[in-house]
Amino acid sequence: MDRREFLESIAGLSALLPGLSLQQAFAEDVHARAQAATTLRTLDAAQNAAVSCIAEILLPQTETVGASQVGVNRFIDLLLTESMLERDRDRFLAGLAAIDARSRSLCGAPVASARERDQQALIRSLDEALPARAPTRAEQAALDRQPMTAESGYQLLKRLVVFAYFTSEPVARDLINAPIIPGRYDGCVSA
Amino acid sequence: MSAPEPTSGKYDAIVVGSGISGGWAAKELTEKGLRTLLLEAGPPVVPERDYVEHLQDYSLPYRGYGNRRKLQAEQPIQSQTGGCDEWVSKWFVNDRENPYHNDADKPFLWIRGRHVGGRSLMWGRQVYRWSDLDFEANAREGIGVDWPIRYADIAPWYSHVEKFIGVSGQAEGLAQLPDGEFLPPMQLNCAELHVRDSMRERWGRERVLTIGRAAILTQPHLGREACHYCGPCWHGCITRSYFNSIGSTLPAAAATGRLTLRPNSVVAEVLYDPHTNRASGVRAVDADTLETLEFSARVVFLCASALESARILLNSRSARFPNGLGNSSGELGRNIMDHPFGAGAEATIPGMEDHHTFGNRPNGIYVARFRNVTDKQAKFVRGYGFQGGGSRAHWERGARDKGFGAGFKNSLLRDLGPWQMWLGGWAECLPRADNYCTLHPTLKDKWGVPALHIQCTFGPNERELLKDMQVTAAEILEAAGARDIRTFNEELEPGLCIHEMGTARMGRDPKTSVLNAWNQAHDVPNVFVTDGACMTSSGNQNPSITYMALTARACDYAAEQLKHGEI
């Protein structure tokens, strides 16, 4: 049941439909704005290459869209430019630089220019270093005072790439497609 | 064209604040025939324009990540709470316009909503009755002062409120968590059913897990529609399926034809007439024009929230009450409490991966208090209840799980991940005179009202409760065969639970309390305070339904007193 079907199924709710129309209008305005922002404003060419390359390694195009197709790099640039605290932005960029430095050291080139086999090996080593669990608030505060490394930079980047990919409209709407208005709750149903 | 806002006038009653308590006061007083002026500091909320519960992540500029620079600049305190998100940060105050002070080493987070409906728009919707285990606790242990009421005094008013707001829940027959007038309960999910059954096997009736008792409709109720399980109630609800003032009490009050609602009206003080020893009305400031407003009434109900009502009374100074209206006891502003929370345990529940949920249930589980109920703990008094729930992480686990590449992506798209279960305790906070607020000598808000200095810390009893809840949460998960059990204590600051209370406590003795058994100021009989300020102890249950029940009870009393010329 979609949103309109649900609303139509409820007697006496036609007066509430304008409220949903306004929410839709807001959404359309946001889309128009996002489409217009095609120029990167914070990531330089090398940084963008690193973000795009790693994002595509993490979530590649298969029979479904990959990170590049849904503009993960552009969304991360938007957050870096408009939303992220400057301190967090600087830590993110320092982490990116640390990953590229590691790549130069191990692969002889920044990650985006390295051979595919070397890229995979680098990402595998960074991925295996991810912590087993999320830090507590106090632990995170202590971590935030440490200088960025390739490992902590990768952790930040992976978190953002996953977020950017799965909250993008093509993925959220077309692939995950969770109903906006389920209309009921079932607590334990077999697949 | 709407009528111009009144800038003065005489009413039978003035209610300050339109949130959970103020909405109830407006409803009850108008339904009892009183012409009532409801003053709200903030602007109106128009559901058709302002509710955003169906906007998806991708429809927002930052997809829920939020504009953290703007939050840091304008709402550094408000944004500490999860509800102040990209959708509805507009419903939390601007911290620059609404300053308060605390010592740097004693942080207190004061989370506020100033708009018609107040925090009833964003509240957690959990409603639990108190029992005599709570009302008798202070007297039994010699802590603070005794409550002037017992469960029998408030029980009919709990029923009165529940029947109107609609509470879904499961009757369990527990003495320490009395059952109410319940609509059908929401379902537990697979993990919760498993943990509940394990607890039954291990602890019998000592530790009982039940579905959260929530002010959310599971069937149509008094003209409001049943929940459609979209999930984020705090973003608004166009079908009015959860209780808030805007969708329930205020329309009822308006239907009487006796309600005047004036938004953008910042009440600065209650006016006092020394000749009659009565409040004569209130002085307010128009939030837009800064014009001074004065309204008079036969009775004044303060429902502005525990700290805000205390601020108004502290700022209502006269020769008779140089330290604040109704403060002959010196207790006004003291005994601030807030529930310690943010500690417990979480774990993976193995199996059942071929089962899933459908819909977004805006509710969790509840484990009724089991400490110091029939046993006696050596290290602490009182207890805590657990809230929490079972879930599967879906794609969000990809942000922390190991893995990358096509298989990783497909797994995140296709698989829901293992069942997880978390339990977090909400503990009782003891009343202490050294947790207090006073008027700051120089700091004022945007409207010229003196700001508060707030001093509040958790004490040894609260710290012991936070320790114990980690142990017992882990025990419960272990009994359920969970793996990867992790205890946590986020060491959250007081205030963040948004259950602040106690600043004008009820009591039997005017020398040690501000309000009597009817929420009526001992010193000034036509002033009533029925928000969290009135609380003599904190219990461990979410407090809003107790505020609502006390408000309705106080309104009934006040209306009778007015009718008989007693006030």
Image (tube, coloured by chain):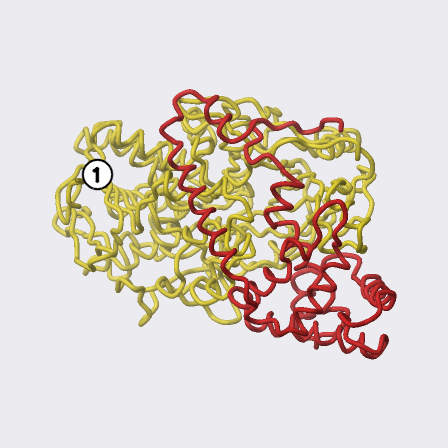
Chain colours: A red, B yellow
Q: Quadrant of the N terminus of chain A?
A: top right
Q: Which residue is located at x 53 percent, y 71 percent? A: B105
Residue B470 in the image, given as x and y percentages of width and height? 71, 50
Q: Is residue B344 left or right of residue B10?
A: right
Residue B560 in the image, given as x and y percentages of width and height? 24, 29
Amino acid at pointer 1: Thr
Residue B449 in the image, given as x and y percentages of width and height? 28, 62
Q: Which residue is located at x 63 percent, y 38 percent? A: A177
Q: Nearer the viewer, residue B497 or A114?
A: A114
Quarter location, residue A43:
bottom right
Query: Does any portion of residue B130 appear in the rendered image?
Result: no
Relative to A6, does residue B4 appear above or below in the rendering?
Answer: below
Q: Is residue B537 left or right of residue B50?
A: right
Relative to B404, does residue A80 appear above or below in the rendering?
Answer: below
Query: Does any portion of residue A169 appear in the rendered image?
Result: yes
Q: Quadrant of the C terminus of chain A?
A: top right
- Please count the marks in the image: 1
Question: Neighbour class for label 1 at 10 Å: few (<14), some, many (≥20)?
Answer: some
SS of the residue at dot 1? strand
Q: Which residue is located at x 54 percent, y 30 percent? A: A2
Residue B128 in the image, given as x and y percentages of width and height? 53, 34
Q: Nearer the viewer, residue B505 or A114?
A: A114
Q: Nearer the viewer, residue A96 or B170?
A: A96
Query: Which residue position is annotated with label 1?
Result: B260
Quarter location, residue B413:
top right
